[in-house]
Amino acid sequence: MDAPSYEYLKGLSLSQLMDLALATKLDHRGTRFGLCTITNARSGACPEDCSFCAQSVSSRAEAPVYALKDLDTLLHEAETAKRSGAERFSIVTSGKGPSPALIEKIAQYLEEIGRRVDIRLCASLGIISVEGLKVLRKAGLSRYHHNLESSAGFFPKICTTHSYQQRIETIKSAKEAGLEVCAGGIIGLGESEQDRYLMAKDLAELEVHSCPLNILVPIKGTPLENKEPLSLVEILRTVAMWRLMLPRAAIRIAGGREKVLKDMQAIVFMAGADAMLIGGYLTTRGRPPEKDILMARELKILWKALRSS
């Protein structure tokens, strides 16, 4: 089925978009609700100039800086993630991409975590070759995360130290290596609604499995520190649009969920979203996981009732 055009989607009211998106989610993905968590395994001192990131060379923000965490720390975090209800645990490192030595070290960690913790393993290490990804897959990696961040046209306004095409090629490399792909982006950077549509269109063409949707939380010290937050209406339109563009992928609400949506968090899951990142983000904390588990349980009950009505 061809993806709906932007002209068609922009002509729909919010109510129409949300109704279509929720029906699409229930038709293609049932009442599934995905939960994952990440660890900031190596933080700060990143040479890339992504304007939204506290760890970037372009940032004056107070972000933690440390080398790769040790195995015992990551094991403890993976065990905590499992107990908290997460299905996936992702190792995230700062920087443009991993060195061969870092790939080998993380491969060793993946093997050990996989032996001791019953949780699916993911990683987000930046731009990486097919060969490096195959090493990680052999060690137990199931999914690689690499966001597009925005549309091809808007991307140069938020990053100049690497290209949009390099991000596309990394996603293709992960698929070639036999990995599932988690790829999405950030909204609220100053892009248009059409930019958000075009990003979703690229993700659909890449046939990614999971699409994390981050909502910008302006961080003091970054170039976007004074950016006005998106309205709830804009966020809901984007979530619904992404669901209609990506009917079989998990639409995963990630950074910005707590701070931007506040008490309105649950409503995005009536607009087609059906997954979320729990426990915190790279440089900011989330809310207690037990609250998210309860919300997910209640939403699944509601979806089941709607699906059978």
Image (cartoon, helix red, strand yellow):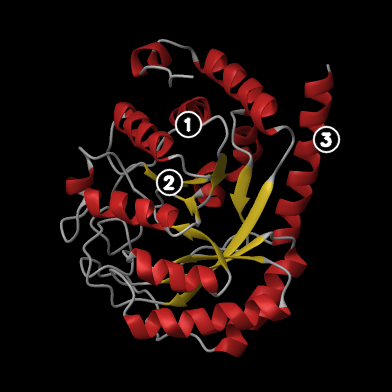
Q: Quadrant of residue 110?
A: bottom right
Snapshot quadrant of residue 82: bottom right
Instruction: Check residue 184 in the rendering and tell me which mark sits there, or answer none.
Output: 2
In the displayed structure image, the side of residue 157 where residue 31 appears, left or right:
right
Dot 1: element: helix
* SS under mark 3: helix
Report whether residue 218 is seen.
Answer: no
In the rendering, which numbered label is found on residue 242? 1
The residue drawn where x is 58% and y is 60% is: 286
- The residues tagged by marks 1 and 2 sit, at their Cα atoms, a distance apart of 10 Å
Asked if labels 2 and 1 touch by Cβ distance under 8 angstroms, the answer is: no
Residue 152 vertical position relative to residue 35 in the rendered view, above or below: above
Nearer-N-terminus badge (3/2): 2
Which quadrant does the C terminus fall into?
A: top right
Q: Is residue 248 placed above or below 56 in the rendered structure?
A: above
Disc 1 to disc 3: CB gap under 8 Å: no
Q: Upstream in the sequence, badge 1 or badge 2?
A: 2
Q: Is residue 234 above or below residue 147?
A: above
Residue 83: x and y in percent read: 77, 69
Point 74% across, 45% down: residue:
295
> In the depicted view, which residue is nearer to us: 9 or 163?
163
Where is mark 3, residue-wise?
A: 301
Pointers 3 and 2 in contact (C-beta within 8 Å): no
Q: CA distance from mark 3 to mark 2?
A: 27 Å
Hey, what amino acid is under mark 3?
Ile
Q: Secondary structure at mark 2?
A: loop
Is 154 left, or right, of 122 in this rendering?
Answer: left
Is residue 24 visible in the rendered image? The answer is yes
10 Å crowding of disc 3: few (<14), some (14-19), many (20+): few
Q: Position of residue 284 (x, y in %)?
A: 49, 65
- The percent coordinates of residue 201 (x first, y second) are 37, 31
Q: CA distance from mark 1 to mark 3?
A: 23 Å
